[in-house]
Amino acid sequence: MPVDAFIDTNVLVYCVSAHPPEAAKRAQAEALIATTDFGTSAQVLAEFYSVVTRKIASPISRYDALRFIQALVRLPVVPVDADLVLEAIALEQLHQISYWDAAIIAAAHRIEATTIYSEDLSDGQLYGKTRVTNPFRKRK
C-alpha cells in the first residue's frame, strides 16, 4: 500500500469549494489529486465530511460529499485503530504537536508516504522520512 503522498483534509476541502476567493486553491487542489499517487486516512475522510457539509462558506450536499468520499475509498485509506492512536501519541510527545496532527503523520508513515500535502502543518517540516508540503504556499 505504499504511496508517494498523503493528502490532508484541507486539500480535499478545497477540491469542492465553491467560494470565489478560493478558486485558485480549488484549481491547485484538483490538479494535485489528479496527478499524485496518494492515500489518506479515515480521520481525514470523517473531517472532510463534517467540514464540507456544515462548516464551509458554501456547504455541499451530504450526497455529494458521500460520492466524493466513495471515490477516495478506492485509494489507500489508513484506518484509525489502536496502533495508530499509540503511534500518534508517541509522535505528539516527541514533536510537541497536537494529537490530531500527529495522527495525520502516523497515518502517512503507515502508507510510507514521503510527502504530506497540508495547509495546516508546518511547511517543510520533516517527520522521519515524511516531509510536509503546503501546496498553496507561494514558492520563490
Image: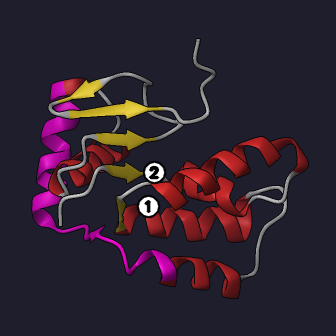
Residue type for callout 2: Asp
Occupied quadrant, residue 130: top left
Q: Secondary structure at mark 1?
A: helix
Instruction: Tell whether 8 sits left or right of 104.
Output: right
- The question of residue 91 being in magenta is answered with yes
Q: How many marks?
A: 2
Q: Residues within 10 Å of mark 2 (few under 14, many from 20)?
A: many
Q: Which residue is mark 1?
A: 44
Q: Secondary structure at mark 2?
A: loop
Q: CA distance from mark 1 to mark 2?
A: 6 Å
- The question of residue 56 being in magenta is answered with no
- Find residue 18 and report its horizontal and vertical position in percent: 83, 59
Highlighted magenta segment, given as a residue range: 71-94
Residue in view at x 54 percent, y 36 percent: 135
Q: Residues within 10 Å of mark 1 (few under 14, many from 20)?
A: many
Instruction: Tell whether 54 sits left or right of 88.
Output: right
Instruction: Tell whether 138 sits left or right of 118.
Output: right
